[in-house]
Amino acid sequence: MGSITLKDIRKSFGGVHVIHGVDLTIEKGELVVFVGPSGCGKSTLLRLIAGLDKPSSGAIEIDGRDVTRAGAADRGLAMVFQSYALYPHMTVRQNLSFGLENTRMPRSEIAARVADAARMLEIEELLERRPTQLSGGQRQRVAIGRAIVRDPTAFLLDEPLSNLDAELRGTMRAELSALHDRLATTMIYVTHDQVEAMTLADRIVVLRKGRVEQVDTPLNLYNRPANRFVAGFIGAPNMNFFPAVAEGGQAALPGGVQVAVAASGPVSFGIRPQHLRLAAPGEAGIPARVTLVEALGAETVLHARSDGDTDVLVVLEGQPELQRGQELALAFDVEHLHAFDAQGQRID
Ligand SMILES: Nc1ncnc2c1ncn2[C@@H]1O[C@H](COP(=O)(O)OP(=O)(O)O)[C@@H](O)[C@H]1O
Ligand SMILES: [Mg+2]
C-alpha cells in the first residue's frame, strides 16, 4: 500500500496563491522527489499531503481513500524534517519509542521495532545518549529511525540532509537510497538540490512557482526537458542557451552555424556544457573568446563569451592547454541540441 493521488490541489495563504492546481499520482513503493527553487511550494505541498495543512481546494487520496479532510494522525504517514525535531530531554531510545507509547502497541513490540530500526541505521550504540551528544548525521539518523518504527504507509522527507556537510550528505543519500530499496515503502523527498533529486528519485516532480513543470524519470528530464526552465534547472553546470530567429525551417547559431528547427520567429537553443567541444581544424563551430579557465584535474571548465555576447560554459575532459583571451570555435553534435519556442516550450 502507499499510493498517493493529488487532484487539482490549490493553496493560498491570506489571498496569496502559493499552489496553483497540482495533479499527481505517486505509485505504491515509488521514491518521488519534489525539486525546485526555494519558495516554489515544495514544503507547502508536502505539508498538505501530511495533513499538517488543508488545501484551499482539490482532493488528496491515499490508497484510493479521500483523506482531504482527515487529520495528520489518520493518514498513516511519517514525516522527517531538516531540523530533526528530536526531544532534547529524551534519550535516543526514548525518542524512537515515544510515538508508539501512546498507541495500544505492546511494550515487547515497541522494543523490537526500536531495535530493528537502530540496527538498520547503525545507531545501536547511541541508544542511551541524548540528542546534544550526537553529531548532525547521527541526529538525522535518529529522526529517520523515528519515522521507520511507525511502519508508515509513506515517508515524507523535507530537505532531510540540508543541514549536513557535503561529504556526509553524499553518504546519507546513498544510505537513504539503500533504505528505500530495503523497505520498499513509498517516499516523497523534497529538495532544492537537483543532484540529490537526480541520484535518489524513481521520478522527479519539477516545481516552479506553485506549478508542476514536468514529471519524469531523472534521465528523461535530462535528455528531453519539456521546457527551458527544466532544461536550465536539471544538469550541472547549467545548460547554455543561445537566442536565434527561425525562418523557413532554419535558424542560425552565433557564427552562422545553421540548424533545422520546426518553428518560425524567436527561438532559443540549449546545449549542455558537456556537449560542447573544441572544433577540429576546418570544422564549423560557435566562435568564442575564453574568459576563464578552471582546471579541475579530471576535467576543465571553460568560461567563454560567444559571438552575440552570450556567456558559454564548456566542460572538457582532461587538461587541455587554454588561455584567457584565446579565440576558439565550439563544435557540437546536433542531436545534443535542445530547441525551445518563444514561450520556452520544447520544439521537437
Ligand atoms: N504559513 C504560511 N503563510 C504565508 N505564506 C506561506 C506560508 N507557508 C509558505 N508560505 C509561502 O508560500 C511559498 C512557498 O513556500 P514553501 O512551500 O515553504 O517553499 P519551498 O519549500 O519550496 O522553499 C513561499 O512564498 C512562502 O513564503
Ligand atoms: Mg521548504
Image: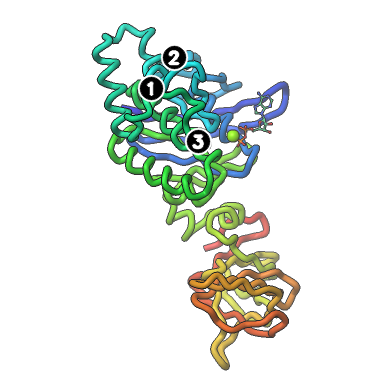
Is any atom of residue 7 visible in this view? no
Residue at 52% across, 72% down:
297
In the displayed structure, does residue 101 sit left or right of residue 85?
left
- Label 2 is placed on what type of residue? Ala
Q: Secondary structure at mark 3?
A: helix
Q: Given contact means CB atoms under 8 Å apart, are the residues at marks 1 and 3 in contact?
A: no
Residue denoted by label 3: 136
Q: Are marks 1 and 2 in contact (CB under 8 Å)?
A: no
At horizontal 66% and vertical 82% (from top left) the residue drawn is 323
Nearer to us in this view, 123 or 104: 123
Q: Is mark 3 within 8 Å of ligand 2?
A: no
Q: Residues within 10 Å of mark 1 (few under 14, many from 20)?
A: few
Question: Dividing the image into four equal quarters, which quarter contains ligand 2?
Answer: top right
Between the C-alphas of marks 1 and 3, the distance is: 17 Å
Which residue is under mark 1? 128
First-in-chain label (1 vs 3): 1
| Residue 166 placement, left or right of 74 | right
- Label annotation for residue 73: 2
Secondary structure of residue under mark 2: helix
Frontmost of labels 3 and 2 is 3
Tag nearer the camera, 1 or 3: 1
Question: Sequence-wise, which precedes: disc 3 or disc 2?
Answer: 2
Disc 3 residue type?
Answer: Gly
Q: CA distance from mark 3 to mark 2?
A: 27 Å
Residue 170, given in percent of the width and then of the height, sits at: 45, 48
